[in-house]
Image (cartoon, helix red, strand yellow):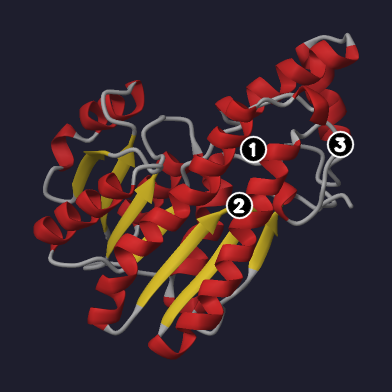
Amino acid sequence: MSMTGKTVIVTGAGKPDGIGRACADRFLQLGANVVICDLPDSDGISAAIEDYAGEQDRVSCIGADVGNPADAKTAVAEAIQKFGGIDILVNNAGVGAGSHDFMELTAKDWELSLTVNLMGQVNFCEAVIPEFLRRGSGVIVNISSLSGVGAISSIPACYTASKFAAVGLTKQLALQYAPNNIRVNAVCPGSVRTDMMRGAMELMAEQENISIDEAEALEASTIPMGRAATPVEIATSVSFLAGSDAGYLTGVALPVAGGMPPGV
């Protein structure tokens, strides 16, 4: 599968071991131009600028807060100016915040979860869809979660609600823009070896009064394939949905979870 000549925006792609960075690298391997977005003045965007210093002809690193509509519009405009257009948007930026106990969640937990996990995707979709309409085609892949298709024990309600919302957004946009040759799908990862998973394992270890290694083993025991995914494995699914081989798929929420059930 070649994506030579295509331009892809990936949000939340600054951290070297994250899903977003794995997506950026995957699209680069396939020949695409890649726009990496992460928080301005963050370690993530600084790391990306350094890591891709020799790829400036095919990679652009842009500081953008996905929760800020103006930042989304600016990032899209800069991408169009540099590469002449945009073909694919990967809405990857996300956060995990708050307690597993609903009554312990704060207004800040809810605000952060919804601002980043839902409105961040809304903002970039609003910024890029006019370009897709102008070009007559486009693809959006939203990163949701296995928690976006079923409630899972020990996951904060604000996270689950925001990821369900991301799936709902995906399906509604897919329905509306299918006649315009714009496909919109979601990838719903289960456990993935990222910083967010490490934080979740620390929380589980604290809640269960066990070691982090024991928490990871407990998590693995719930996965039929017996292990968490790597970010690269998620990126491969993203690139599939973004590519021509998935040209008749839209409105799909694809679990990529090693057989792990989505809960209730």
Q: Is residue 65 left or right of residue 240?
A: left
| Residue indicated by mark 1 | 192
Q: Which x, y percent locates residue 215?
A: 82, 20
User: Looking at this view, is 11 or 97 the one in front?
Assistant: 97
Amino acid residing under circle 1? Val
Q: Which mark is residue 29?
A: none
Q: Which x, y percent locates residue 176?
A: 50, 82
Amino acid residing under circle 3? Ser
Secondary structure at numbered mark 1: loop
Q: Disc 1 to disc 2, how far (Cα)?
A: 13 Å
- 114 lies above or below 17: below
Amino acid residing under circle 2? Ser
- For marks 1 and 3, the one nearer the N-term is 3
Which of the two marks, 1 or 3, is nearer to us in this view? 3
| Residue indicated by mark 2 | 144
Secondary structure at numbered mark 3: loop
Give the farthest residue toward the bottom: 179
Q: Disc 3 to disc 2, how far (Cα)?
A: 17 Å
Mark 2 is surrounded, within 10 Å at the Cα level, by few (under 14), some (14 to 19) or many (20 or more) other residues, namely: many
- Asked whether the residues under the numbered discs 1 and 3 touch, taking CB atoms below 8 Å apart as contact, a structural biologist would say no
Q: Tell me if residue 101 can be seen.
A: no
Q: Which x, y percent locates residue 148?
A: 70, 52
Examine the image and state in which quarter residue 193 appears: top right
Mark 3 is surrounded, within 10 Å at the Cα level, by few (under 14), some (14 to 19) or many (20 or more) other residues, namely: few
Secondary structure at numbered mark 2: loop
User: Looking at this view, is 115 or 207 the one in front?
Assistant: 115
Quick one: quadrant of the N terminus?
bottom left
- 243 lies above or below 199: below
| Residue indicated by mark 3 | 153
- For marks 1 and 2, the one nearer the N-term is 2
Residue sitting at x 23%, y 56%: 76
